[in-house]
Each structure stands twice: as C-alpha cells, then as structure tokens.
Amino acid sequence: MVTLDSPRARPPGDFNWMSTLWHEIAHVITLQMSSQRLPRWLSEGISTYEEKRKHLAWGRDQVLEFANALNSGTLLSISELDRGFTRPESISLSYFHASVVVEHLIEAYGLESLRTLIRAYGDGLETEEALARIDLDYERLQASFDAAVEEQFGALRRSLQNRPQNLPEGPERLEALRKLAEEQPDNFNVQFGLGQALREAGDTAAAR
C-alpha cells in the first residue's frame, strides 16, 4: 500500500505528486522482490533512478552539488552511502548519489544484474554476498563507479575548481565580477557568480 498527499493537499507547485507516486511504487516492487531487505542506498537509488527514467524533469537534479562534493572529497563511498541518509545535511545529495550508482550498475553490468542483486537480498544475503552473485565486491564496484563518474562529471568538476578568489564585498563585488566575466567568458564559476550578484542587486533581466 502507498499513502501520500492527494494532488490538492498542498498549494500548486509545492510538490510533484506524479513523480512521488512513481518513486513510491518503485519502492513497493523492489522491497517485495528483496523481502524488505534492500539497503537504503539501493532502495532509494532505484526509486530515484526510475523517476528520471520515467521523465527527465523528475528526479533530483543535483549535478552541481555532486560535482562540488567530488572536488571537496566529501562524497561518501558506496559502502558508506547508507550513512548519508541519516544526516540532514546530506540526505538530499545521497538520493542523487545513490541514483547515479544505480545508473552505473545498469549501464556497466546490465539490468539483469540489478535484478539478480535485488533478489539476492530476498534470499537473505548481505551486501558483500549479494554483490558476489554478480561477480562484484565493494572495491571493484567503487573502482568502476569512480571511473564512470570522472568520465561523466569530470569536465564539470574541473570547471568548478576555478572559483574567483579574494573578491571585495559590497557594491565593488559586482563590478569585480563584471570585469572577471569579460576576461573569463568560459569560466562557469565567474559567470554563475555574476548572475547571482546581479540577481541579488535586483537586475534579474541581466542575470539571465
């Protein structure tokens, strides 16, 4: 059974009930297949992946946060990913992170491997034993995931490293960002920073 707010329970635009329902139905299916034994990261990862698979506008679009976590070295390993769902500051990113892991599992090892993994939990196996059923372990999965993530997010990750430093405060900050934006038209952080500063200054037209 799935329970959730009806479409009229909240103000329009407050939440997407269709994506929420799709997410929860995916939980029903995978939890039944695994006898309720899926680890949190895999359960949420599959449901969030299914949201994106159903509709590109659904799911959690946290590519920038994910790339920043890669740069800062704060991204949890797959074996520790369940912990991300117990911390308020990391829950949202953990949903996205887990969905990227599931996407990698499917693309690298096939959809049938994911089904086998889910059923292995239903047979009472723990994660290491379940991964062994698809000829994997945490170390090998992490290594292949890291390589795939660098290929997919590497360019963005590197662009986010070039952040403007030592900018003045107050009105001078906007002018400094304007100058940097002219000098570095391909620097994402500079252009994004200028857009934010323009919006804060009330110039939403220029911020676009």
Image: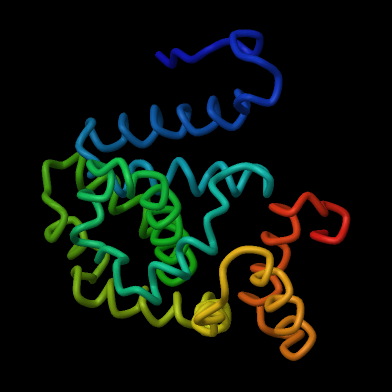
At a point 31% along the width and 29% down the height, the residue shown is: 32
Spot occupied by residue 75 in the image (x, y as percentages of width and height): 32, 66
Q: Nearer the viewer, residue 42 or 94?
A: 94
Q: Nearer the viewer, residue 3 or 109?
A: 3
Is 104 on the left or on the right of 64, as rendered? left
Residue 166's place in the image compared with 170, above or below, is below
Spot occupied by residue 183 in the image (x, y as percentages of width and height): 75, 91
Name the outermost residue toward the bottom: 183
- Locate the N terminus and report the quarter of the image it occupies: top left
Q: Nearer the viewer, residue 208 or 4?
A: 208
Residue 158's place in the image compared with 40, above or below, is below
Q: How many marks overall?
A: 0
At a point 39% along the width and 32% down the height, the residue shown is: 27
Spot occupied by residue 136 in the image (x, y as percentages of width and height): 23, 70
Is 7 on the left or on the right of 146, as rendered? right
Name the outermost residue toward the right: 205
Please say which color scheme the image uses.
rainbow
- Locate the C terminus and report the quarter of the image it occupies: bottom right
Is 17 on the left or on the right of 24, as rendered? right
At a point 64% along the width and 13% down the height, the residue shown is: 7
At a point 24% along the width and 77% down the height, the residue shown is: 140
Residue 47 location, quadrant: top left
Residue 200's place in the image compared with 180, above or below, is above
